[in-house]
Image (cartoon, helix red, strand yellow):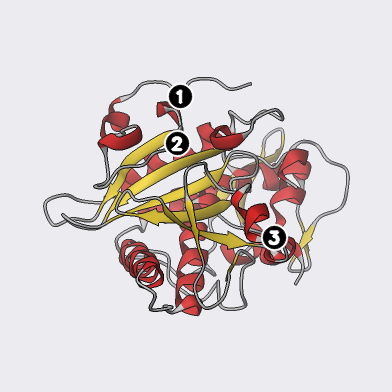
Amino acid sequence: MSGRRRRPLAHTCRAYPRCDFMSGRRIGRTWGGRGLCMALVQEDIFDNALDFSPASAAGAKRVSEMLVFLRQRYATFTAGQAGDARFFRIGVRLDAERTVQLYFRKQNLYLRGWTRDGGTDFMGAWDDKERKLDDAGRVRLIPDGMTLRKGSDFVQAEYGSGADKETLSRETMEGRLAKLHGYLGDVVAGRGGDTAGAEAALHVIARMTAEMARFGLFAKAFTQKWAAGQKQDYTVTVQLQYSPGQYKDYTTPPFRDAILKWAKLTKKSNSGTDDLKILGKDVVQVEAEAIIGGGAKWRPEAG
């Protein structure tokens, strides 16, 4: 596959600024049931980022705050980071008993894998090269203190052909996170589990987290339709200034196609001179800037 369809999922370190929406964050053993014996620093943790329990509400405002966190942690990447400093996590509560923790790489915003209920059993998503490593090699690619788990087959990091078919919505997010929770539980219990289903769930979650953090214009439309949902062929129309005094409406390519061009759109938005076409249509600088829309821009270290 070409573009981002075949890449893994789910930049001087500075502290994440204190703000009210971070009040649900916890460090180490204080959140999530059994407790995590990890060394992620507090600034790299946003637990209770979303809460789907009946007593709470995973509203659009919380989704926007979660995306801000993803972008700001991406901005703390440095080339010398090692161990847990390479990662950050968001935690989601499904109900009174079940939680899921999603781990991302600061280097590229890839969704590295997940745990459940605050435990240390870790299910990773692996690209072509990583799947050829032995267990010792793969352990070096995940947060410290984790027990690496594998079902009947690897969960692949590359987007599959059906990754753009699911609706992006609150209901989808809750259901697919529940799928990840159940799958990891099955693997730990020795039941194998539905690897293909977990893989599909992880890919659509990556599109509602990492991809939305990259593409601010699409993210704004996504949060506005968080409850109702929308298909991944949605576009956004905005008014752009192409030259002094010249304004006209611009309609983006569909979300599912634009996200495959993260690097090229970033370069074009930064005054890049290379031609860029999406679905046969030229994209100029002002249009690329609009599509990125304050999102996390690609950088060479992201690969």
Residue 120 shows in the view: yes
Q: Position of residue 76 (x, y in %)?
A: 58, 28
From the image, tell me which residue sits under label 3.
130
CA gap, disc 1 to disc 2? 8 Å
Question: Which SS class for mark 2?
Answer: helix
Q: Earlier in the sequence, mark 3 or mark 2?
A: 2
Per the rendering, the mark at residue 16 is 1
Number of the front mark, 3 or 2: 3
Q: Position of residue 263 (x, y in %)?
A: 74, 48
Q: The residue under label 3 is which amino acid type?
A: Glu
Per the rendering, the mark at residue 249 is none
CA gap, disc 1 to disc 3? 31 Å
Residue 45 found in image quarter? top left
Report the front residue among 258 and 113: 113
Question: Which SS class for mark 1?
Answer: loop
From the image, tell me which residue sits under label 2.
69
**In the rendered image, the vertical position of residue 159 relative to residue 84, given as above or below:** below
Report the front residue among 67 and 7: 7
Report the front residue among 293 and 105: 105
